[in-house]
Image: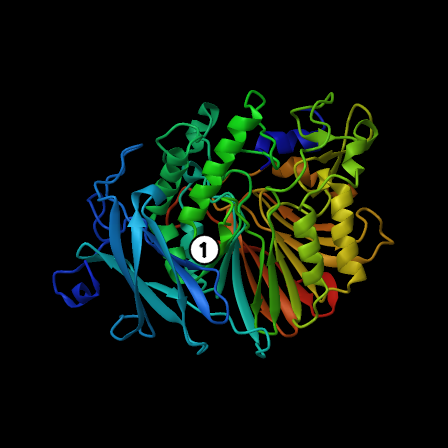
Amino acid sequence: MITPARRSFLVLGAAGGLAALARPALVRASSLAHPGIDTCFPFGVASGDPDGNSVVIWTRLGTLPLRYRVSPALPATVDVHWEVSRDPLMRSPIRTGLVTARRSEGYCVRAVVALPPTGAPYWYRFSAAGCASAIGRTILLPAPEIRTSRLRIAVASCAHYEFGHYAAYDRIAEDSPDLIAFLGDYIYEHNAPPRRAGETVRSYGGPLAHTLEDYRWRYAIQKTDPALQRAHEAAPWISIWDDHEVLDDYSGIFSSARTETRTAFLRRRQAAYRAWYENMPVRPGTRLSNGRYRIYRRMYFGDLASIDCLDGRQYRAQQPCPEGPDAGEGHMEPDSCSALFDPGRQFLGANQERWLARNLARKGQIWSIIAQDLMVASLRAPDRATGHYRYWTDSWDGFQAARNRLTDLLHDLKTPNPVIFSGDYHAHFASEIRQRPHDPASPVVATEFLGTSITSPGPSYAAIRSVLPINPDIHFYDSRKRGYILAEFTRDRADIRMKGLDDVRDPDSAARDMARFIVERDAPRLLPG
């Protein structure tokens, strides 16, 4: 993630059992219903990673009030029952099952539930120790061969708990999306710096995260938020990570903390990945048999859209020229950093890149959605001292040969109607992606919509606005509001709304359209909506 100050520096060039469900004594164990007291399910419920036959449902047991590094007063293992119904009141369950919550896994549980592909929504809940969870709503995705007319997807990222309330999550839930795509920075490993204390509305209440328990704590704190719980209850999520689930601006096996040893960082990264896996509604196969994690995957929404979810952190090389004269600033000139163009430097990693190439060659769907964490469009800024252009090295701009391979794939494979969704930057951007950036003769191969943050502060609006004339493929930019993207795909067009909150400090804030774009089928251009 690019901190606001560093972004500005870049552009300025300066600085109880199923039977219990029928008992009248059963309570809905929710932090919303009983704030501040012990409950069974204070972290809500979630669903995710649906396909044409099944979906993941998730919850986490715990007790309130939360105490840092104090385990819940629960046995080492707890039986948790789940049920799924076609009825929002859960009167006639069609699937039931049992999972075991374990202290060793942070009392997180998930079940992969096989369901009939009816095209209608389902509702689910959990029960344990005589109380029941909130009820969540979920869906299956239409199979790849099914003719499908509409997909509504909300896109979100970057939700620092301290820098605002989660009104954006409530507005997402009210928009009734089919899917919610979360593109990274679900938690933040660090607290707000003291100099920004006046911008915060609440506190994580723990130190910088290093251990498994530290990361679990941060998920626990955030998941007690009522608005986040409502967003998880509203629709299934497809989730990827970015950097703050581990450490700001880490890259592959390389820590951004210069005093941290490789061994210490890899131990920290493993703890962070595990906590993410425990707390997100992702498939069990995300955790591989060798203890590693694979989050890149493909989904289909009928014949309307494919969705490729990418991992832009785990497999990549270190940012270029980390020891050069600008080391630590994260912005480099090509003349002083030839590694910007080194074809051997990976962004996705060789295996993921080959996997993506196979997917982009397929032609069965109308829209090819790519959900990933970092800005693909090139954003260059002049250096006042030299007059040369500088590039931010943590995004695809720092891996220009890898980006060229991506855009070559989109062009050469004639990938149908690519639309890229991105996060990380804490601002709204709408861009046309050319096969070669900054070359007006190069063909446009995709459109990109980068969404602003849920809460995290944005970069300088004026500073980046000032460099847009030398970045003409960026058609819209605004960092002044927190919010999300709401996108609707039909067989003829994509309708993209870039939403902004009136006030991130207001838990009930409204959200309004900041910009709207249309992308017509077979015409990868941005049209005003």
**Image vertical order of residue 174 relative to residue 2, above or below:** below
Three-letter code for the amino acid on which mark 1 is drawn = Pro
**Image vertical order of residue 267 relative to residue 365, above or below:** above
Residue 107: x and y in percent read 31, 47
Numbered circles on residues, count: 1
Using residue 304 as the reference point, say whether residue 483 is left or right of it.
left
**Quadrant housing residue 164:** top left
Within 10 Å of disc 1 (Cα), the crowding (few <14, some 14-19, many 20+) is: some
Image coloring type: rainbow
Asked whether the viewer can see residue 292, the reply is yes
**Quadrant housing residue 369:** bottom right
Quadrant of the rendering where the N terminus is positioned? top right
In this view, the residue in front, 128 or 171, is 128
Using residue 195 as the reference point, say whether residue 14 is left or right of it.
right
**Image vertical order of residue 255 relative to residue 472, above or below:** above
Residue 220: x and y in percent read 35, 42
- The residue under the point 78% across, 33% down is 339
According to the picture, the residue beneath numbered tag 1 turns out to be 284
Asked whether the viewer can see residue 503, the reply is no
Quadrant of the rendering where the C terminus is positioned? bottom right
In this view, the residue in front, 24 or 379, is 24
- The residue under the point 48% across, 46% down is 454
Residue 144: x and y in percent read 58, 73
| Mark 1 secondary-structure assignment | helix
In this view, the residue in front, 366 or 115, is 115
Using residue 398 as the reference point, say whether residue 223 is left or right of it.
left
Residue lying farthest front?
290
Residue lying farthest right?
441
**Image vertical order of residue 483 relative to residue 85, above or below:** above
